[in-house]
Image (tube, rainbow, N blue to C red):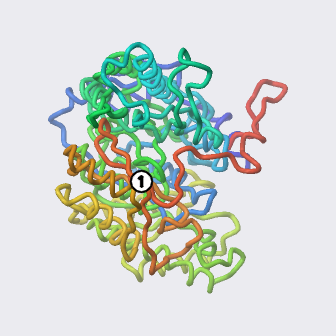
Amino acid sequence: MPSSLQIAQEATLRPITEIAAAAGLEPDEIDPYGRYKAKVSLSVLDRLASKADGKLIDVTAITPTKAGEGKTTTAVALTQGLGHIGKSVALCLREASLGPVFGIKGGAAGGGYTQVVPMEDMNLHFTGDIHAIGAANNLLAAMLETHLLHGNVLNIDPLSISWRRCMDINDRSLRDIVVGLGGKANGFPRQTGFDITAASEVMAIAAVASDLKDLRARLGAITVGNTYDGEPVTAEQLQAAGSMTVLLKETIKPNLVQTLEGQPAFVHCGPFANIAHGNNSVVADRVALKLADYVVTESGFASDMGMEKFFDIVCRLGNLKPDAVVLVATVKALKHHAGDPDGGMDAIETGAANMVRHLGIIREFGLNTVVAVNAFPGDATEEVELVKRIALEHGAYAAEVNNGFLQGGKGGAALAEAVVAAADEPSKFEFIYPLDAPIEDKIEAIARRVYGADGISLLPAARAKIKAFDKAGLNKLPICMAKTHLSLSHDPLLANAPTGFTVGVRDLRAYTGAGWIVALCGDMQTMPGLGKTPAAIHVDIDDRGETVGLF
């Protein structure tokens, strides 16, 4: 079998104008970026305002191994499978960050014969959205420094500044830095740091803004620090929000591309689910729901991460209602959770406790679950069947094998049939916590009802922030937990379905523009680092000028 990159490079793509027309978009509602990608005007939402929304399917996963379990591949396979059985379907994915592309996970466009194309563009610069987000973020930082130097009219306490710079590369040396060295002309010396762009508040704002006006208002509401009197200082007060919006006026438009089998794919925004809210943009979901009968959207990492945030944050802010969930599981991951990666059926039985826990998490939200066993070539048939049986025994609506990697839409057809049936069943979607609950209670509800913890432990810095946020009137905001994706707990070493643990929260951040509070758990970092052998080592250009080693 050729590599995923070879398959993508050899694919015959349809012009994006044809994809747009087939999806129901008017010619003046798209701005092509070359032949195979386009920006979509939000005016389509006004034109189709009276049209009923399609069914919304969220694709999530069990707790993954470090390399992931093929969630994007499964989302694309389901999309192509729905197309294979004759359904009107659209896919919504996050944009690829260069951090994981050149880090450990590689690309974010699927794999094998279930991919979104043009694959190279998507995994690298695409339409420039992430670059624009980084520029807007860092413009605010620069304008803040300039304000301090030229009189500090707003009376900002430099030591209270919480706004951080960002970049779209994993660079651990920038987590904690000192700026302003070299004299007064270079700024006020203080400790700060960088976040990865995908985890920045500007990215979060782009992902939840409903239109350009809302984007402008949310950017203006960003809190950068406090005055010496303890009052918050915003980007609006720094007169930065207008120029930031201008940098992002094209970024807010969803990007349209296609699957290998020609289904429309809206790829927009790219937050990490272990740090940020981990889902594509609200406007991409809204556009897709107006155009297609079935919309497949993928939440980052596992159900305790991106899915919980999709439901408790994104669905609240975007007034979205999911109809069913696909839970991706692999034989490999279940053996990993058993602590026996080379084991057999017994290891699957033991590690399946993790899958069972995730099925329970989805039940907490009142939705039907279809388990998709993402098949790998080395998986034994009896092992795959065992995973399916355990899933059904513990409450899954259905369990099917995803063979899309090898077979494309045909290999995802059985999964698609099961998802259609699940989405047609009645469900009672509900949130994990009410917004008017105290901040501490909301964090504890997530820890107990989603992670399975005995409770939470708030360090002094976190308790102080809760008091400050209560005083500032921010206590009605939802919670975005920043924790490891490698465990249901905050400790990456606790595999499978841990019990008897307490989630430690070391600090809180108020994303006043995006509209939620970030709870930093354990030693979770907002700037990842590259591993010993990053994927970037294998990426190169061959003698013909073609990319090699990108996966």
The answer to whether one can see residue 15 in this image is no
Q: Neighbour class for label 1 at 10 Å: few (<14), some, many (≥20)?
A: some
Q: Nearer the viewer, residue 281 or 91?
A: 281
Residue at (52%, 50%) from the top-left corner? 72
Q: In front here: 133 or 257?
A: 133
Percent from the top left, x then y, of residue 533? 76, 49
User: Which of the pair 336/143 is nearer the observer?
Assistant: 143
Q: Position of residue 397 (x, y in %)?
A: 35, 72
Give the x, y percent position of residue 211. 27, 28
Question: Residue at horizontal 42%, vertical 30%?
Answer: 158
Residue 270 position (above or below residue 233): below
Q: Which residue position holds label 1?
A: 507
User: Which is more toward the observer, 443 or 264?
Assistant: 443
Q: Is residue 289 left or right of residue 347?
A: left
Let me know if residue 33 appears in the view: yes
Outermost residue on the bottom side: it is: 346
Amino acid type for the residue under numbered disc 1:
Asp
